[in-house]
Image (cartoon, rainbow, N blue to C red):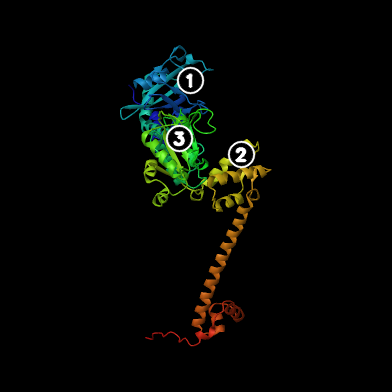
Amino acid sequence: MEPFTYNDLDVLHDLAKILASPLDLRDQLEQGLDELCTRTMMNRAMISILDRDSGIAILDVAHGVDIDSREIIYKPGEGITGQVAQTGKPLVITNLDEEKHFLDRTGSRRSLNRSELVFFCVPVIHDDKVVGVLSADKAAMEADNQEYELKLLCEVAELIAKAVNMRVLEEENIMLKNILKKSRQPSRELVGNSKTMKDVSDLIFQVSGSGTTVLIHGETGTGKELVARAIHMNSPRVQNPFIEVNCAAIPDTLIESVLFGHEKGAFTGADKKKKGRFEEANGGTLFLDEIGELSPLAQAKLLKVIEQRNFQPLGSNTFVKVNVRIIAATNRDLEQDVAAGMFRADLYYRLNVFPIYMPPLRERGGDIILLANYFVENYSKQLKKSIHYISTPAIDLLLAYHWPGNVRELENCIERAVLLTRGDTIDGIHLPLSMQKQMVTTEEKQQRKLESLVASYERFIIVDAMKAARGNQSKAARLLGTTKRIMQYKVAKYNIDTNRFKTIKPRATNRH
């Protein structure tokens, strides 16, 4: 095999310099292909990277080929690229038109006379593993020494091997991040990038796959029901029912019938048999909202069902066995209720196996604007409006407000604003008047605070000057670089007694 020419050695040297540059890996490889093709008269050069799990070759960088953001892949053994990726051996095709395995998946050679093209394809190997494939074609009349050309391309492949391997790792990292992001996004409705919401998402992700009982704590309007739904939707029970019961809305006399059902004639008005919520949720999830509002009698009955996993409908002599996952929610401090004897301790410990705390909106920072934009988009579609922006003054109002009603209040606020808006932007005037007034009040308080601080500091330096001048206002004015008239005004304004400074002895000074 003849040695490389000076020109080809120079090409390899320039490629090494490109790969040592601070450019992104993809940019390095693109520039490298440009240099290779320009200096060696090769055409349509491509680098494919290998997915390490599947062995699929994915076209990553190209020169002279318009891939147009398409995903072009080759399965192991598929086409020339797939064969080289699978075997790790270089190939040269002397006549592309006669090669049945050449797929031309990019379509870049369809309009060319392929019988006049020689195709080179070599593996890119890093740490004894194929990490990619480098390929290029050349006019047959220019490729008079195909063995030499193949050797040169193998040298280039060796030179770029580290960069190609890093591209494989980069793409795997991006893919894993996307998978992780999707897998850890339990619900589209649980909007938020704050740390507290990411913590909630992590807990949902951890508990969803099990059958563990969950207790969701949080103020009214924080979205506890969304968390319960997200757990169900990401659990193995997703194909089975999600049944919600608002415990605060059921009278104590009906709670047993609602939860456990009844037989026909069990009580006045029971004209037919009816399933309870437990039986309706069989195989799925039962969400008990506002669990802290249950009466002591209802708490006792619920505890028995949780422990025994069966119950008797009203008026029935038979037991119904159920397989139900329980998720409960409360806006009360149940520990305090247990201490006060208002909630059964044994039921609380049965429910509080896996607690999740939903933070109030005021603790979620920038999530307020994320949620506001989410609701703007939703209600714009519902109300057939074209609203795309929230003005800066409106954003200031949203961020300054304390949101006692949490996410539910924000949603109502945005729905109202979308209704009122006639243009494409929500302004401060479209937000509730109470919110606008609070902003004014806050600004006034801040202004008063600033004025108070300034006045306090001003009085301090005047008193200090008066001490130094022993109550002489003219001298104090000269010390502060002002006039006697202004000094007299300030002394009167801050009610400073100048006489008390006249008796202060001047500080002794050391003489050497």
Q: Residues within 10 Å of mark 1 (few under 14, many from 20)?
A: few
Counting residues from the start of the chain, the first of labels 1 and 3 encountered is 1
Front-most of residues 15 and 279: 279
**Type of residue at label 1?**
Arg
Q: Position of residue 317 (x, y in %)?
A: 41, 29
Q: Which of marks 2 and 1 is nearer the N terminus?
A: 1
Write down the residue under mark 1.
105
2 or 3: tag closer to the N-terminus: 3
Q: How far apart are marks 1 and 3 (CA)?
A: 52 Å
Q: Residue 286 carries which label?
A: 3
* Left or right placement of residue 85 versus residue 262 in this view: left
Q: Nearer the viewer, mark 2 or mark 1?
A: 2
* Mark carried by residue 379: 2
User: What kind of residue is marked 2?
Assistant: Tyr
Tags 1 and 3 touching, CB below 8 Å? no
- Is residue 11 shown left or right of residue 373? left
Q: Report the mark closest to the observer, 2 or 3.
A: 3
